[in-house]
Amino acid sequence: MIKTIKLTVFAFLILASAACNQEKKSNSVEHVTKAILDDAPKGLIEDVLTKEEQDALTPDEVIEVLKTGNIRFTNNDLTARNHSEQVRKSTLAQFPKAIVLSCVDSRVPVEDVFDRGIGDLFVARVAGNFVNEDILGSMEFACKVSGSKLILVLGHEHCGAIKAAVDDVKLGNITPMLQKIRPVVESLEYDGERNAKNEEFVHMVCESNVINTINQIRLNSPILKEMEDNNEIKIVGAVYDMDNGKVSFINE
């Protein structure tokens, strides 16, 4: 009987010791984890742009913001941001600096390309970065209603939509979509091979498509044309280089 009691007490002591060690180990892990989290960078918490700050911006200042942001992107020096905090700060209002019309291409992450955070940019995307009634309406909302100071049409190298337009691809709803780009292809004077395998010609179409899109914005939106004429906004174009991430602005 005494022997049984001794064994029971011994077993209890072993279990208690194991539990104690486990608790110490758990506390130690929690302590280390907390220390790591405490030391980790929290990210920049930017103030969301106010209406007054947006009003004070000029189109040229916004262009410069995008250019310097792109330099940081190409240098792999993106700003660390606290996106959760930015989401909360931009819940009730937004006053973006610009609207960017980009292709849908997944290799062109627009906000990252310009090192911009939540609430900084309106972004419209369509394969081949052309304009239609819906996109023009979105641009008018961004600039006339919400106060953005810049429209940037952003094309990119190795664009599948441009290549498809060059080769006059026929496939479902892609066919009428490409008809928005085909006039650019057909209008270019070029003596070389006019197909998607010719990178020089594809690049020419890419740039010309950006310029044509800008012209279509001015032609089909009296609201935006008037705002540009009054120096309230600028409408500019650029091309994103897939090889190095650099954005080159086009001088019309």
Image: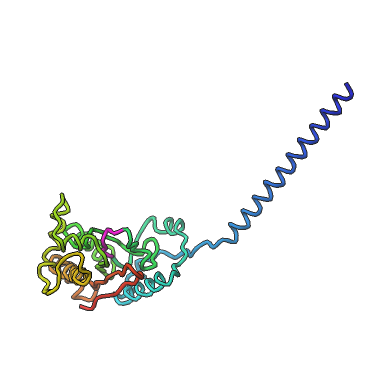
- Give me the residue at 12% from left, 72% from top: 188
Depth check, front residue: 3 or 41? 3
Q: Quadrant of the C terminus?
A: bottom left
Q: Quick check: is 157 in the magenta stretch?
A: no
Q: Residue most toward the top?
A: 1
Whole-percent x, y for residue 123 in the image: 29, 61
Question: Relative to 188, is 92 on the left or the right?
Answer: right
| Residue 95 seen in the figure | no
Q: Is residue 3 above or below residue 40?
A: above
- The picture quadrant where one finds residue 132 is bottom left
Residue at (69% x, 50% y) in the render: 28
Q: Quadrant of residue 234?
A: bottom left
The residue sitting at the right extreme is 2
Q: Position of residue 40 (x, y in %)?
A: 56, 61
In the image, the segment drawn in magenta is: 100-105
Q: Which residue is drawn at 44% across and 67% down?
A: 78
Q: Where is residue 25 in the image (x, y as percent from the top left)?
A: 70, 47
> Residue at 14% of width from left, 73% of height from top?
192
Q: Is residue 217 left or right of residue 148?
A: left
Where's the N terminus, which quadrant? top right
